Image (cartoon, rainbow, N blue to C red):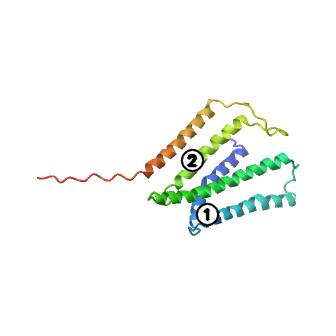
Amino acid sequence: MKIDTWVWYVVFAGLSWGTYVPLIFYGGSELGGKSGSRMLAVLCVGVAYFVIAIILPLVLFVTGKEEWPDVRSTGLVFSGLAGIAGVMGALCVIFASKAAISAAKDAGLNPAAYRIYIAPLIFCMAPVINTLVSLVWHPQPGNPWHFGFENLPGWKLVLGIVFVAAGAFLVLLSKEEAEQPAAKPAPVSAQSS
């Protein structure tokens, strides 16, 4: 069975994003726990973005390994908007982990108690939003605002979205159960002989 190249990129993206929340949660926690520790985590993420997303492409273009593309303003604007969305998502994950630690401490729980809920909620919501936007937004070259219902999916995709929504509900339900105080065992009554 031949697997298309794009599927491998999807797998690697899933692995990258799937490990992002635990990595940033731990990394931010190891930066001292002071108010500035999350901003230092943001700085570390920014340095990684800079090296991988700025230095590497520039080196590839300058050395001729990649050909300079035709530059169009709509391409620059929408690629920039995608970058903003990516960075805002990364920032929100970092601050979600900080807020989760505070909320867990306020609830009298282990500071890492809510860490496990961050990624499932993000990654339940993101594909649903992506799918809904992709259902109606069909940009064409020179016409980025082309909307309509084209190439509607079959029932399996719709069912998949329902399952994702059910998954998000179950994650939130699980969080609520984790917040309930543990039931104390019933006292053992002494029996007389």
Total number of numbered discs in the rendering: 2
Residue type at numbered disc 1: Arg
Q: Secondary structure at mark 1?
A: helix
In percent of width and height, residue 178 lies at 44, 51
In percent of width and height, residue 179 lies at 44, 52
* Furthest residue toward left: 193
Q: In the rendered view of the protein, which quadrant contains the N terminus?
A: top right
Residue drawn at point x = 78 percent, y = 47 percent: 78
Cβ atoms under marks 1 and 2 closer than 8 Å = no
Q: Of the residues under marks 1 and 2, which one precedes in the sequence? A: 1
- In this image, 176 relative to 83: left or right? left
- In this image, 42 relative to 183: left or right? right
Q: Which mark is residue 121?
A: 2
In percent of width and height, residue 93 lies at 61, 55
Mark 1 crowdedness (10 Å alpha carbons): few <14, some 14-19, many ≥20: many
The image quadrant of residue 141 is top right
- In this image, 106 relative to 71: left or right? left
Q: Nearer the viewer, residue 88 or 193?
A: 88
Residue drawn at point x = 80 percent, y = 58 percent: 57
Mark 2 crowdedness (10 Å alpha carbons): few <14, some 14-19, many ≥20: some
Rounded to the nearest angstrom, the CA distance separating label 1 from label 2 is: 21 Å
Residue type at numbered disc 2: Leu
Q: Secondary structure at mark 2?
A: helix
The residue to which callout 1 is attached is: 38
Residue drawn at point x = 75 percent, y = 49 percent: 81
Looking at the image, residue 27 lies above or below residue 137: below
Dot in front, 1 or 2: 1
